[in-house]
Image: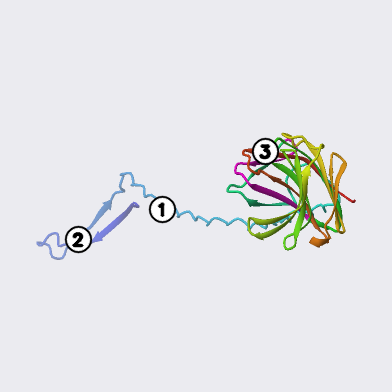
């Protein structure tokens, strides 16, 4: 509050006994400056202006898609040696007879087939190629049951097979599927030979299909040549076979299989 003087002037009849005399009195009132300390007034600060956060610039990531590698299967040659050291690959299997399926494994670079039920036949057919003339051979091992080779295989027309058995005998058969798991076998030839030892399946066996003839070999030696004109199979796939007959358990090994030209 500021300091100043305030003047109040009024007329007063000081002495009514002297009407002429009129005294103009001025009474001056001095308003003193206040000596009290003024109360500070808190100034109102302007509210801060908070700018909204600036959104980050949109990312412009470029997605790069790497196409999955394309694997081109290696063609299987017409003629080859299978040593059973990776997987069965093109070998497709089926069973005839028997109550239990055989257990099949690759073991120590061999195809191992274990039978737990009697009268069970196992087939593994190589599905990559068909042949009109071909030779197939195998190194086999075991003590009982049988091991054999297949040629001119056809799902509809049948096949030829040559088997050697643990009892020292052999047979040559014409086989044909009747229904699933049921096959018909027609004997072409069978017998004993000095090339086979009872209680052993440790041989190299061979089978050649050419036109209307079959050639069967044991340890590289020709055992029989058979005319099969009556069965009329002109070509097909190749494969291997094993059986338990009436003995169980039976284990048969194929250490390698070779498919070659005649």
The spot of residue 169 in percent (x, y) is 75, 41
* 47 shown above or below 36: below
Upstream in sequence: badge 3 or badge 2: 2
Q: Which residues are magenta?
A: 108-127
Q: Give the dominant element type of the magenta stretch: helix, strand or loop.
A: strand
Q: In the orientation shown, which residue stands out farthest toward the front?
A: 191
Contact, mark 3 vs mark 2 (Cβ under 8 Å)? no
Q: Is label 1 in a helix, a strand or a loop?
A: loop
Mark 2 → mark 1, Cα distance in angstroms: 55 Å
Q: Quadrant of residue 63?
A: bottom right
Q: In the orientation shown, which residue stands out farthest toward the left?
A: 17
Q: Is label 3 in a helix, a strand or a loop?
A: strand
Q: Nearer the viewer, residue 10 or 44?
A: 44
Q: Is residue 89 magenta?
A: no
The spot of residue 180 in percent (x, y) is 63, 58
| Residue 44, disc | 1
Residue at the image position 87 percent from the left and 40 percent from the top: 220
Upstream in sequence: badge 1 or badge 3: 1
Residue at the image position 59 percent from the left and 47 percent from the top: 100
Mark 3 → mark 2, Cα distance in angstroms: 156 Å
- Name the residue carrying label 2: 23
* Label 2 CA crowd tier, 10 Å (few <14, some 14–19, many 20+): few
The spot of residue 75 in percent (x, y) is 82, 53
Q: Is label 2 in a helix, a strand or a loop?
A: loop
């Amino acid at each position: 509050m500021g300091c100043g003087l305030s003047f109040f002037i009024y007329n007063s009849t000081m002495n009514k006994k002297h009407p002429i005399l009129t005294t103009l009195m001025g009474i001056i009132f001095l308003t003193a400056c206040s000596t009290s300390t003024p109360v500070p007034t808190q100034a109102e600060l302007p509210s801060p202006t908070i700018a909204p956060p600036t959104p980050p610039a949109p990312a412009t990531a470029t997605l790069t898609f790497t196409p999955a590698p394309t694997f081109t299967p290696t063609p299987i040659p017409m003629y080859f040696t299978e040593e059973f050291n990776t997987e069965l690959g093109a070998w497709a299997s089926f069973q005839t007879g028997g109550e239990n399926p055989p257990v099949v494994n690759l073991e120590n670079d061999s195809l191992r087939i274990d039978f737990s039920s009697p009268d069970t036949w196992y087939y593994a057919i190589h599905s990559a190629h068909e042949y009109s003339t071909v030779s197939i051979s195998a190194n086999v091992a075991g003590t009982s049951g049988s091991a054999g080779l297949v040629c001119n295989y056809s799902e509809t027309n049948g096949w030829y097979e040559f088997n050697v058995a643990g009892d020292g005998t052999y047979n040559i058969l014409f086989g044909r599927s009747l229904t699933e798991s049921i096959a018909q076998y027609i004997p072409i030839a069978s017998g004993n030979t000095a090339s086979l030892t009872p209680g052993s399946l440790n041989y190299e066996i061979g089978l050649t299909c050419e036109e209307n003839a079959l050639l069967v070999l044991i340890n590289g030696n020709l055992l029989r040549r058979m005319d099969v004109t009556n069965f009329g199979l002109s070509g097909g796939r190749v494969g291997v076979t094993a059986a338990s007959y009436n003995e169980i358990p039976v284990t048969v090994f194929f250490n390698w299989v070779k498919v070659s030209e005649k």
